[in-house]
Amino acid sequence: MNMNEAGLAIIRNAEGLRLRAYRDATGIWTIGYGHTSAAGEPKVVGGLAITRKEAETILARDVATFAKGVAAAVTVSLNDDQFSALVSFAYNVGLGNFRGSSVLKAVNAGDFEAVPRRLGLWVKAGGRTLGGLVKRRAAEAALFMKQDGVEGSIDTPRGKPVLRSTTIWAAALTAILAITNHLAQVVGYTVLGLALTAAIITAAIWIIRERIKKSQQEGI
C-alpha cells in the first residue's frame, strides 16, 4: 500500500498552499499545505513564513507520517487508491480521530461500500458544515471506490420508508397522546390517566432506543 499522486492531489487541492502562518477554521495556526504543530516540525506560530520548496518538504514528511499511521491501523489489504484516500482523510482529521472513526471500522470489516457514507459524516469544523470539507470527502470517497481507472459508484443515501421513520412514528404518537390527554380531561383521569402515563413512558423508551441504535450504526 503506497500513497499515490491522486491522494496527494486531493490534499494539495483541499488544503491549498499558504506560505505565511494563518489560523484555520478552528483557530489553529497552520502553514504550507495544512501543516500544524500537531504534525511535527516546524512549530507553527503567528508570523512564521516558509518558501514553496520548504512547504513541499514539510508536506512530504507529514504525508509519510500519516501514511505510516494509517498502514498501522488498517488490518485488511487495500489498493493504492483506497490507501491514499484514507491517508488524505487522516491528514485532515488527525490520526487519533481516524483510529476511532467508523470509516476505519468499515474498512477493517471489509465493508468498503459503507466507506463513502462514513466519510460523508466528517464535514464539520467548529460546529459548522463546510463546503470545502464536503468536496474533500466526496473526492476521497471517489478515489476509495475507484476501480481499474474508472470511478466507482457512490450510492446516494436514500430516505427511509415512511413506516420505518422514527420521526414519523414520534409525530404520530404525539398526536395520539394529545387526543388521549384531551379525552382524559373530559372523562377523568382514573383509567385514561394511567393509560396515558404508560403510553408516554413506552413511547419515550422506544424512541430513545431507536436513536441509540441509529447512532451506533451510523456514528462517525
Image (cartoon, grey):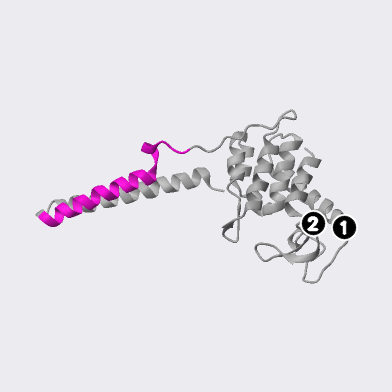
In this picture, residue 171 sits left or right of residue 9: left
In depth, the one of 83 and 30 nearer the eye is 30
The residue drawn where x is 14% and y is 57% is: 185
Q: Does the magenta segment cover residue 92?
A: no
Residue under pointer 2: 17
In depth, the one of 16 and 113 nearer the eye is 16
In this picture, residue 30 sits left or right of residue 56: left
Report crowding for label 2: few under 14, some 14 to 19, many 20 or more residues within 10 A (C-alpha).
Answer: some
Q: Position of residue 69 (x, y in %)?
A: 74, 48
Amino acid type, label 1: Arg
Under circle 2, the secondary element is: loop
Under circle 1, the secondary element is: helix
The residue drawn where x is 34% and y is 49% is: 205
Q: Where is residue 136 in the image (x, y as percent from the top left)?
A: 68, 47
Q: Which stretch is magenta?
A: 159-186
Residue contact at pointers 1 and 2, CB within 8 angstroms: yes
Q: Position of residue 97 (x, y in %)?
A: 64, 53
- Of labels 1 and 2, earlier in sequence is 2
The total number of labels drawn is 2
